[in-house]
Image: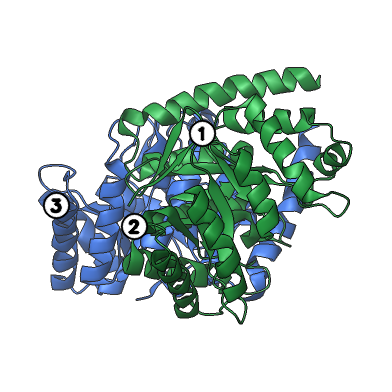
Chain colours: A blue, B green
Amino acid sequence: MHTILKSNTKEVVIGADKPFVIIGEKVNPTGMKKLGQALVEQNFDYVKHLAQRQVAWGAEVLDVNVGHPQIDEVAIMPKVVEAVLAAVDVPLCIDSNEPKILEAGLKLAPGKPLVNSVNGEEKQLATVLPLVKDRGAAVIGLTIGEEGIPATPEGRLAAAGTIIERAAKMGIPIEDIIIDPLVMTVGHNSNAALVTLKTIELVKKEYGVNISLGASNVSFGLPDRHSVNSAFLALAIQTGITTAITDPIKLGSCIKAIDLLLGRDANSMRYLKYFRATEKLRAQEAAVRV
Amino acid sequence: MHTILKSNTKEVVIGADKPFVIIGEKVNPTGMKKLGQALVEQNFDYVKHLAQRQVAWGAEVLDVNVGHPQIDEVAIMPKVVEAVLAAVDVPLCIDSNEPKILEAGLKLAPGKPLVNSVNGEEKQLATVLPLVKDRGAAVIGLTIGEEGIPATPEGRLAAAGTIIERAAKMGIPIEDIIIDPLVMTVGHNSNAALVTLKTIELVKKEYGVNISLGASNVSFGLPDRHSVNSAFLALAIQTGITTAITDPIKLGSCIKAIDLLLGRDANSMRYLKYFRATEKLRAQEAAVRV
């Protein structure tokens, strides 16, 4: 199954027979003070820098989130979308819990954007899915039900089913739904990653849809998070995720290596190309810092 | 199925329900000039250093290989085994293609050692398995047949079967056979890792034995080998390998993270302990270098 996203001129295809798609996570002020400050000051140069840098490091889609206590998010979302588009031409993933903020972003996002996210709660289904349908967008469905995040893979599968069925009733094609099975930190619960991996397996088998993860949550509260994040990406990609909202600078090499190992990169062409490009970027960025 | 290895006082259990076992690869002069030189000079301090360092970084078993063009390997093997045992008390993996060299090492190896390796060729089966049987050792069986390394998973499964059946006829218990499905570099063949992963699946399903890999071969000839090696370990462990001959300094963190993610480390105890221990080691080793 192929989920197709579009910018003005570019098309990105997400699917199990395609290279893994990185959705760059960095245009998001949560826990990123410098970006929060820039947005408060309506200084968009830093947004442009983040957009450009992530695409240079291999992001094919960019997540745009403007959640910040000191910001009028409905007003600022279109400006951030414009800033990103002034810097790069890639499909966008408009990220908010609030339908109004999503709407503000979707109006300006070109082509076919991705909405991040809806979940299985009635209130969310009823407000977010109509926006997705009207805009002809794709949407990430989080496996959350009325009772919160189910503890079991079967519970999460059921939440995915709720979203997929409701979307179908509204005429949203199933290939425009990307399910996010969610992952909690293994620092609190040693079974957390296994539950997510099992959910991926079930959702893939039952619906065959594309599956995404915000993968770095898995290592929250642990030291040496990179070892955990990169290992988890390998496990999750082997199990069936086809895209992730993540940091291309930290995890791009790991993802290209996984594509190569899983036979999705004939003659290592993309692996080698990525290595050469990022080797150059690393040198340039080091030179700027000196 | 549990493969049990022993030193004088320590027991190491390899099995799917146990933490992953690292067999330290560094006592091997192949491609390691400094060790080759030390062995030629019969200076064993460097061997002791390598043994100690690998165990400090998490190796539970040590591979001992003395292959070098300027060395009388039969004469030097016992001395290297003695040097390793003077430094650490862990089970050993005696590594050679030559039965005479294996024999020389097995005589001095304490407890229950591992033999690395036999393969499915008649000549090897007939000469190595009797040594294994007489010594009461365990053995790594490489999936190589009379025609070399089979290109297909089914061919490798058949080679594994040849070894397991011959060992059974000689009265070697199946739990003392560890199959190595072999991996070639993905730099030459994009399907190389997939063939190995599929072989792991088949061997696990058919025989349920422990499975090992010399994992770093997968990245031969590629840049940024660490990204490929660590991703491949994650894929291979998820698929079913239970031990690997590898570098604990480079890959220990990755392996501890995989154990944690696969639910084999309650409350992250071993992950955190390893992080703290290696953080200290890193600081000590950096201080020595200054």
Relative depth, front residue between B68 and B131: B131
Few, some or many C-alpha atoms within 10 Å of disc 1 (few <14, some 14-19, many ≥20)? some
Q: Quadrant of the C terminus of chain B?
A: top right
Marks 1/2: CA distance? 58 Å
Above or below, B53 against A216 in this view is above
Return the mark for residue B7. 1
Indicate left or right for B43 with B235 as reference. Answer: right
Q: Which mark is residue A115?
A: 2
Which SS class for mark 3? helix
Q: Is residue A85 above or below residue A249?
A: below
Mark identifier at residue A155: 3
Could you classify mark 2 by the number of other residues whose Cα lies within 10 Å: few (under 14), some (14-19), or many (20 or more)?
many
Q: Residue B273's quadrant in the figure?
A: top left
Q: Is residue B75 left or right of residue A1?
A: right
Residue B249 rendering spot, x and y as whole percentages:
62, 36
Q: CA distance from mark 3 to mark 1?
A: 47 Å
**Type of residue at label 3?**
Gly
* Of residues B165 and A247, the one drawn nearer to the viewer in this rendering: B165
